[in-house]
Amino acid sequence: MEKLAEQYARDANLSVFGSRVPALIGLPKRGWFTAVYRWTTHPVPLPDAGIWFPAEAPEVPEWLRPFGGEVLIARDPNTGEHLAGVGVKRHDAYGRELAVVTAPAARGRGLARRLVAQAARRVLDEGAVPTYMHAFSNHASAAVAEAAGFPDVGWTCFGVTEQEVSRSESG
C-alpha cells in the first residue's frame, strides 16, 4: 500500500491510482469513478418545468422511486407521458445531489436545465446546497449543469462504486 501511495503522491494521477482503490479496501469487484463535481447558490431563474410528486406515487417512473421523498417530473400535458425527471439524493442535512434524466424523444427542449434549476431553488429554500455530478465525457450533462447555473470550478469527485463490475469494466 505504501508504494502505491508514493506512486500517487509522485504522479498525482487518479487514472493510475484510482482503479486500484477498490481492491486495496477489500472490494476487488467494485469499480472506481471520477466525475465533475458542481454546486450552486444561484441557479439560473428559468421557468419551472415540472411538478413535485411523492416518490411512491403511481405516476412516478421506476427509476425515480429509489430517491424517496419527493421527485420532480415533467409530463406531456396531452398524454401524461413522462418526459423528464429529477431525483434528489439527500446525502446529509446540507448536501443534496440532483440527478436528471430526459426521455430521448423529449431531449433538446430545455426540460433538463429547467428542472435542475427548479430543483436547485427548492433545495436552497430548504437550507441545503444543491450539487450536481457528471462524467467528464458527458458533454450533454455538462451543458445542462452550466445552463441551470452550476459552474465548473474545477472540482473532481471520485470514489468506489456500489455496484460490482466485471474485471474488464473496472480496469
Image (spheres, grey):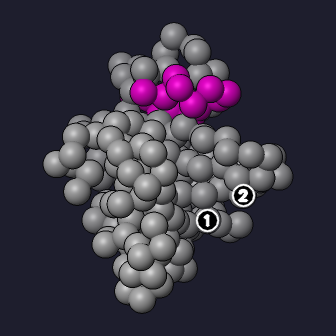
Residue range in magenta is: 63-77
Q: Is residue 75 above or below residue 117?
A: above
Q: Quadrant of residue 100?
A: top left
Residue furthest to the top in view is: 58
Q: Residue at x 37, y 70 (%)?
A: 17
Is residue 146 magenta-colored? no
Three-letter code, disc 2 = Val
Q: Residue at label 1?
A: 39
Q: Residue at label 2?
A: 129
Can residue 102 be seen in this snapshot? no
Is residue 76 magenta-colored? yes
Q: Is residue 138 above or below residue 82?
A: below
Q: Residue at x 64, y 21 (%)?
A: 54
The 10 Å Cα crowd at callout 2, few under 14, some 14 to 19, many 20 or more, is some
Q: How many marks?
A: 2
Q: Nearer the viewer, residue 137 or 13?
A: 13
- Disc 1/disc 2 C-alpha distance (Å): 7 Å
